[in-house]
Amino acid sequence: MSENHEVLIVGAGISGLALARALYRRGISALVLEQRESDGDAGLAINLPGNAIAALAQLGLGDAIRSYGRPVERREYRSARDNLLFAVDEKRFWGDENTPRCVRRSDLVALLAADLPAETVRRGVKIVAVEGGMGDIAVHTSDGAEFRCKVLMGADGVHSAVRKLRFESGFPASARLASASWRFMAPNPGVEAWTVWAHADAMALLIPVDHGEVYGWAAATGQHQRSELADLRHVLRSFPDHVRASVDWALSDEARMHYSPLEEVRLSRWSRDGAILIGDAAHATAPVWAQGAALAMEDAIVLSGLLASRSDWSSVGEDYERLRRDRVEHVQTMTDRMAKAARLPMLLRQRLMPFLGPRSYRATFEPLKIPVADPVNA
């Protein structure tokens, strides 16, 4: 026995739920299969830049998201000695409607899943094989079940099973910014803005969220990068007291620290034989510009619009790639530029940052202020 569905989505993270929501709002049924029983990152937070807020509005969540987290109205880039290199007024740049926010991942996931029928997501389901092509795809799971669909969506992240089963190449590679990083939540030590500190061997970021907490990210970036958690306190030893206090609090219970290898996915194709990749499964980048969730939700808007605008889905994958490729490649290019700048000698980097930093911010985000076009209304 097999189940039949119009669309089968693998992965119940941000990209998978955004796509399921976008399809549901357009009257297209979809089933989401998720290998994990729960989201391991649910206790963390996520920074949503202005284009992510705009995408949420297109998904019908523009008002709802303002009830969660905290607006990110200002960015500060500082040296490890806490000297301000430059700052960005994000509220002024993005405007009141699209001011960035830092929210808890669990809240974002719950919002994306809101209004979906209860049976939309099935957890604890691992896919092991894919057969057939556009219009009639068979997906087999580890427990012997079979699901058939017209189109298969790989929304299952950097280590996508759909990509491994359906595409010939495209394994994740380590990002050039750093080989390892850690994410955590901690009591707010008095940080009022999105703030990053950096020196030759490490970077640390703290973003105020809500309930007196900050979301933290820290990485070793020196020539001799190591991924052992014990090294983190050492490489941050010259950072300001409030940064080290947050890290020390998180390190007091290692369960609070979430190891995050920085990996990227760059593919020549995002669709093949009725299988289409979205979000990190297609184009994961290092989190320099916090575009993972934003690009994933934009993917969902465009892809759902294409499916809703035609009865023949045979060319949807190609059209999706054509509509999304330039925007994604822009983010990848700007990520590469930032990674290159991060490898400059520290003294030179700090001298250049007050001049190049604001220009780089504007060059990255100005094109992203233009909302993605809905193919239904295009």
Image (spheres, rainbow, N blue to C red):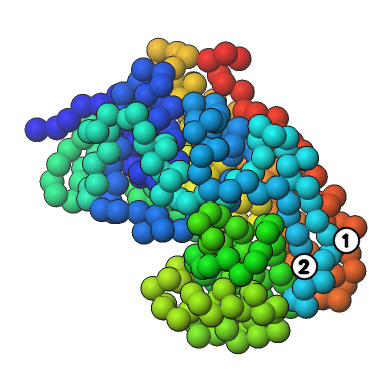
Relative vertical location of residue 240 with respect to residue 6 in this rendering, above or below: below
Q: Earlier in the sequence, mark 1 or mark 2?
A: 2
What type is the residue that disc 2 sits on? Arg
Mark 1 and mark 2: Cα distance apart in space? 10 Å
Q: Residue at coordinates 90% horizontally, 69% vertically from top-left?
A: 351
Quadrant where the N terminus is found in the figure: top left
Viewer-side residue, 120 vs 321: 120
Seen in the image, is 188 located left or right of residue 141? right
Give the x, y percent position of residue 362. Answer: 80, 45
Seen in the image, is 229 located left or right of residue 238? left
Give the x, y percent position of residue 112. Answer: 42, 36
Q: Residue at coordinates 78% horizontally, 40% vertically from top-left?
A: 92
Relative vertical location of residue 328 with respect to residue 284 in this rendering, above or below: above
What type is the residue that disc 1 sits on? Pro
Dot 1: element: helix
Which residue carries the number 2 mark? 78
Q: Could you tell me if residue 178 is visible in this image?
A: no
Q: Residue at coordinates 17% horizontally, 30% vertically from top-left?
A: 3
Q: Residue at coordinates 69% horizontally, 62% vertically from top-left?
A: 195
Which residue carries the number 1 mark? 354
Q: Residue 326: which quarter of the image?
A: top right
Which is in the foreground here, disc 1 or disc 2? 2
Q: Could you tell me if residue 62 is visible in this image?
A: yes
Relative vertical location of residue 134 with respect to residue 282 in this rendering, above or below: above
Dot 1 crowding, Cα within 10 Å, few <14, some 14–19, many 20+:
some
Dot 2: element: strand
Seen in the image, is 272 located left or right of residue 78? left
Circle on res. 261:
none
Residue contact between numbered discs 1 and 2, judged by CB atoms under 8 Å = no
Give the x, y percent position of residue 33. Answer: 28, 42
Seen in the image, is 221 located left or right of residue 172? right
Task: Report the number of numbered marks.
Answer: 2
